[in-house]
Amino acid sequence: MEEALFLTRYARQVTIVHRRSTFRASPILVEKVQQHPSIRFVLENDVVDVLGDDAVEGICIRNTRTGALSQLPVQGVFLAIGHHPNTDLFRGEVQLDDEGYILPVERTMTSIAGVFAAGDVADPYYRQAITAAADGARAAMDARRWLEQHQIEKREPEQETAGSVR
Ligand SMILES: Cc1cc2nc3c(=O)[nH]c(=O)nc-3n(C[C@H](O)[C@H](O)[C@H](O)COP(=O)(O)OP(=O)(O)OC[C@H]3O[C@@H](n4cnc5c(N)ncnc54)[C@H](O)[C@@H]3O)c2cc1C
């Protein structure tokens, strides 16, 4: 629902293709989307193919109840199915939960001492701009305190002397 609303800033018409007739999103959000003049729904359908050679010209959809195939002319396709945190980079490094979110060990600190996580990568629930920004502030404070506790001080840049080589 959020992605569809976001796309209305750029597209004249947004079509939500959804495999079921009901949604898991909050009723208020669903109502807002349903009332949006630029958004329409194609329910109980799966997208089975994207059509077009050099550019998207349409999609092929399949009715999930009858199996009937049909085509829908569209100029772009955006996938928004579930959530997958972008943490593959950290897999095998810091501890992740079953869904791939970074697990905090102590406040914002990860399973590696001195490595801190903030925002959507460590938040399976809120995932909002303001909560991510607040997490960033918390992580920065935790990092500063950790550096102080470990007596790691800010290093001054080396003085340049005539003829010095860097
Ligand atoms: C369509 C949509 C609509 C939304 N609408 C709202 C809204 O209305 N209100 C709201 O509060 N929130 C909204 N959100 C959620 C909000 O955008 C996020 O919660 C917020 O951006 C999370 O901030 P973040 O810093 O954790 O992650 P991000 O903003 O995703 O920042 C992560 C950064 O890391 C970078 N990155 C990724 N991989 C690497 C790498 N390997 N190396 C270096 N950099 C990398 C990315 O390029 C990106 O800049 C929306 C999200 C979406 C997708």
Image (cartoon, grey):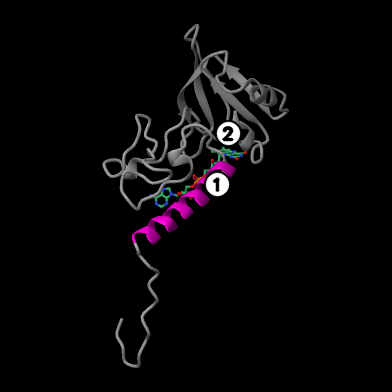
The magenta segment is: 130-150
Between the residue at mark 2 and the residue at mark 1, the CA separation in whole angstroms equals: 23 Å
Residue identifier under label 1? 134
- Quadrant placement of the N terminus: top right
Residue depicted at x 46% and y 31%? 83
Residue identifier under label 2? 3
What kind of residue is marked 2? Glu
* Secondary-structure class at tag 2: helix
What kind of residue is marked 1? Ala
Q: x and y percent of residue 161 in the render?
A: 35, 90
**Tally of numbered discs:** 2
Q: Is mark 2 within 8 Å of ligand 1?
A: yes
Q: x and y percent of residue 157 in the render?
A: 39, 77
Where is residue 149, by image quadrant? bottom left
* Secondary-structure class at tag 1: helix
The mark found on residue 53 in the picture is none
- Quadrant placement of the C terminus: bottom left
